[in-house]
Amino acid sequence: MSKSERRHVPVLSQQVLEYLAVRPGGTYLDCTLGLAGHASQVARQLGAKGRLIGLDRDPEALKLAGERLEALGSELGEAMPQVTLVGEAFSRVSEFVEAGTMDGLLADFGVSSMQLDQPERGFSFQADGPLDMRQDTRQSVTAEQVVNEMDERDLANLIYEYGEERRSWRIARAIVRARPIATTGQLARVVAGCVPTIKGERIHPATRTFQALRIHVNRELDEIGRLLEAAPKLLRPGGRIVVISFHSLEDRIAKDAMKAGVAQGFWTLLTRKPVVAREEEILENPRARSAKLRAAEMNSREQEKVVQAREKSRRGRDAGGQSRDRRSWEIR
Ligand SMILES: C[S@@+](CC[C@H](N)C(=O)[O-])C[C@H]1O[C@@H](n2cnc3c(N)ncnc32)[C@H](O)[C@@H]1O
């Protein structure tokens, strides 16, 4: 058993259970199984009549999650829910899940500790490994291709946009000059060598560049957008969605999707502000520091209609207000 498997603690686990409010006998979807940390906790509450569907596009994560859930099955015996595992991207979730049947959906975005801890997966600059960064190891594009083949301007834009890195031009130029770059260690040294450490900054100078490459290689933001678009169709009334993001780009998509769902009458927000980890959890699991949880509950068709009618009349009032304003302006 690897280091990450032994000490795997799912992030915000108490809060995930609180907001999912697992209904024994219900059907729950974990879109990011990872090491099945959250999924195991949900399974414990579901009982024999419940059903758990788990997705992960990383074949190794899916295998490990399957083993962990099997071990849980031996422990729980008759009380273990039915489990279905799917090794696909969550953007395709509608192909595997029947519309309107889910009582809850969980997505804990980003990389797992297992992926970070294995140098051969190429996600981390802490240990040297090939520049891979693919979650789905069946896909062909790797970080090595991007780093060595992308045009300098596109690379700079990518590091700026997905890494929120202001020094992206300087980094892109240094990368292009240092080509070919084959390992995570080499890339981290090239980045660190071209940008001075910012005073007071706690993160490694290459952190943002690695984040940008990972997001690009795995099309992470597009995946999240498509999952959140599909989610309202999958849940039954009263069903809940819980999402955990780890950086502002992910959280912005979650926040906007939830806001849009509220305006359209699909959701009632359960978290006005994102829920964050308590100090004790951050001390035990530093990764929890950047976690933000947002949750919403699916409205019934009747509630949806009420919100839509209210929204329509608000828009009518706003339009009336605008034309009154315009008239008074014309008089003056
Ligand atoms: C942060 S980990 C999840 C950890 C998990 N909640 C646990 O308790 O063990 C994220 C997992 O989601 C998977 N993942 C990320 N994006 C995905 C996507 N678009 N489709 C399917 N799986 C994805 C990753 O491969 C990774 O294993």
Image (spheres, rainbow, N blue to C red):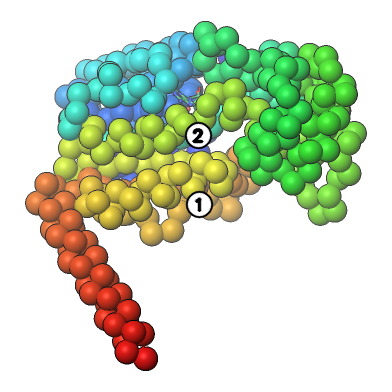
Q: Which image quadrant is residue 87 in?
A: top left
Q: What residue sits 50% from the left and 34% below the top?
A: 221
Q: CA distance from mark 1 to mark 2?
A: 21 Å
Sort mark 1 into few (<14), some (14-19) or many (20+) by Cα contacts within 10 Å: some
First in sequence: mark 1 vs mark 2: 2
Q: Quadrant of the N terminus?
A: top right
Q: What residue sits 66% from the left and 28% below the top?
A: 213
Q: Which residue is mark 2?
A: 221
Q: What residue sits 35% from the left and 22% below the top?
A: 92
Left or right of 207? Residue 52 is left
Q: Nearer the viewer, residue 286 or 268?
A: 268
Q: Which residue is mark 1?
A: 276
Give the amino acid at mark 2: Leu
**Residue 60 visible (yes or no):** no
Left or right of 274? Residue 154 is right
Residue 302 lies, with reference to residue 331, above or below; the image says above
Q: How far across and down, in percent of the image, does residue 103 sit? A: 22, 35
Q: How far across and down, in percent of the image, does residue 210 sit? A: 70, 30
Q: Nearer the viewer, residue 106 or 3?
A: 106
